[in-house]
Image (cartoon, coloured by chain):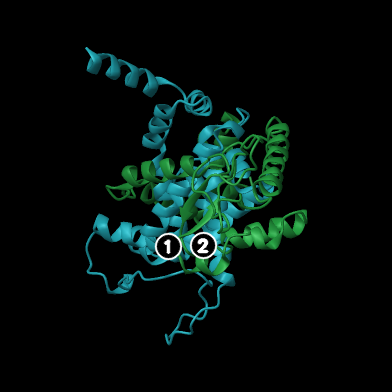
Chain colours: A green, B cyan
């Protein structure tokens, strides 16, 4: 056996796996080669030192921290999102919007056709669902949008919304709209709730 | 009664193989993962400590490796041992970390004689010169310090394979799986790692075995 082969076998420390013949050959070489014999002793010693290295324990809170991270991780996992949109909502949304538009139109056209002879002042926005007090006699009362108080930060006041609606519909006389100045001075604005 | 049945369940879990446990984890059995953590945390931590040289970082990476193993448990395939898979995750995390450290601009520190050290690595071991050691049998603690130091001085690319082979006793095939290297490259890196290690340990070897 040559030194190169002997050094490889010694360095790998696989002597135990060697066949009987190769083992005998290696032993014979080591007996006659001081350098390879030295390498074998060094390898055996370094291997022993490596095996004797003390095992270091992780910090005592390792398990606790890991559990915490695992629970955080499992909470942060993306929730499976239903890829299909909620199609079943679509007909309801459309029909609700259509109904809302119809009621608003009717409310504006019929409810604001003009004050009754007994009333001298234009109607104010009603606060609750109620028959329009200004409905012409002989006609069924039209439900007016229910109005609730909201914070003053609402971008459009009810009168502006009504104005906008009126400008779109083009059927409501401007003088039948509520008094904008009076409404604006009110600290709490009102706006129609979607119905 | 409940305690008894819980203990029986726990004993049963501890007898199961790693591969069986990780498959249970994939099926949603969290307790199986606790057993895996208890089995592997110390050895994994020590492996990472030898690669990273910093206890805090080693613990951080060990935790991250366990978290990833848990989250991706369903990706585990039984073609490899669980430990091989876990160490692959951990080794990749270490490599990413070292790469990140190298790409991060560093402040220049004034120090002497450190030019030859690898970037992104630390050497804060203060060892006495072997020649200055008192003439007596080396204390075990001193040997341990030398060995730890020598491991840290092995270049990182040889150190992975060296530690996996010499300390964790992985087979060459397992090391190839963990490091993603070819078998021949693994063999060569281990041998180079051994040469570096012996070279650094030379003063101690001379003291123990006598001069060449």
**What is the x, y in percent for residue A27?**
52, 41
Regarding residue B68, the answer to whether it shows in the image is yes
Q: Quadrant of the C terminus of chain B?
A: bottom left
Q: Position of residue A73 (x, y in %)?
A: 47, 44
Nearer to the camera, A104 or B12: A104
Is A149 placed above or below B110 here?
above
Depth check: A64 or B186 in front?
A: A64
Element type at marker 1?
A: helix
Q: Residue B3 is drawn in which quadrant?
A: top left
How many numbered circles does the render carry? 2
> Eyeballing the image, is B204 above or below B177?
below
Q: Which mark is residue B196?
A: 2
Residue at screen point 26% across, 57% down: B141
Labels 1 and 2: the sequence-earlier one? 1
A64 is higher (above) or lower (below) than A181? above
- The chain identifier of the residue carrying mark 1 reads B
**Image quadrant of residue B54?**
bottom left
Q: Which residue is mark 1?
A: B150
Q: Are marks 1 and 2 in contact (CB under 8 Å)?
A: yes
The quarter of the picture where the N terminus of chain B appears is top left
Frontmost residue, B123 versus A136: A136
């Amino acid at each position: 056996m040559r030194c190169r082969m002997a050094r490889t076998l010694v360095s790998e420390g696989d002597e135990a796996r060697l066949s009987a013949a190769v083992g005998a050959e290696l032993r014979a070489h080591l007996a006659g080669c001081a350098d390879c014999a030295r390498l074998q002793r060094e390898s055996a010693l370094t291997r022993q030192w490596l095996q004797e290295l003390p095992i270091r324990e992780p910090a005592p809170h390792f398990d606790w921290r890991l559990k915490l991270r695992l629970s955080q991780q499992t909470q942060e996992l993306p929730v499976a999102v239903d890829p299909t949109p909620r199609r079943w909502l679509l007909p309801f949304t459309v029909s609700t919007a259509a109904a809302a538009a119809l009621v608003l139109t009717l409310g504006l056209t019929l409810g604001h056709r003009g004050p009754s002879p007994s009333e001298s002042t234009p109607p104010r926005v009603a606060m609750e669902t109620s028959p329009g007090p200004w409905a012409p006699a002989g006609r069924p009362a039209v439900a007016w949008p229910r109005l609730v108080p909201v914070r003053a930060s609402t971008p459009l006041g009810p009168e502006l919304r009504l104005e906008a609606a009126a400008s779109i519909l083009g059927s409501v006389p401007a003088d039948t709209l509520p008094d904008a100045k009076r409404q604006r001075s009110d600290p709490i604005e009102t706006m129609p709730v979607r119905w | 009664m409940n305690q008894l049945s819980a203990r029986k369940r726990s004993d049963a879990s501890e007898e199961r193989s790693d591969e069986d446990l990780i498959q249970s984890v994939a099926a949603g059995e969290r307790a199986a993962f606790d057993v895996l953590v208890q089995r592997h945390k110390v050895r994994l931590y020590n492996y990472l400590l030898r690669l990273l040289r910093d206890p805090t970082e080693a613990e951080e990476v060990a935790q991250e490796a366990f978290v990833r193993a848990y989250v991706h448990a369903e990706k585990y395939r039984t073609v490899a041992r669980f430990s091989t898979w876990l160490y692959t995750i951990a080794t990749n995390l270490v490599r990413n970390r070292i790469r990140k450290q190298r790409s991060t601009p560093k402040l220049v520190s004034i120090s002497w004689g450190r030019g030859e050290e690898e970037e992104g690595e630390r050497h804060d071991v203060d060892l006495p010169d072997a020649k200055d050691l008192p003439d007596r049998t080396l204390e075990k603690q001193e040997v341990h310090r030398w060995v730890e130091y020598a491991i840290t001085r092995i270049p990182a690319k040889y150190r992975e394979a060296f530690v996996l082979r010499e300390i964790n006793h992985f087979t060459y095939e397992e090391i190839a799986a963990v490091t993603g290297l070819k078998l021949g490259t693994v063999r060569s890196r281990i041998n180079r790692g051994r040469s570096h290690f012996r070279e650094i340990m030379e003063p101690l070897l001379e003291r123990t075995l006598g001069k060449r």
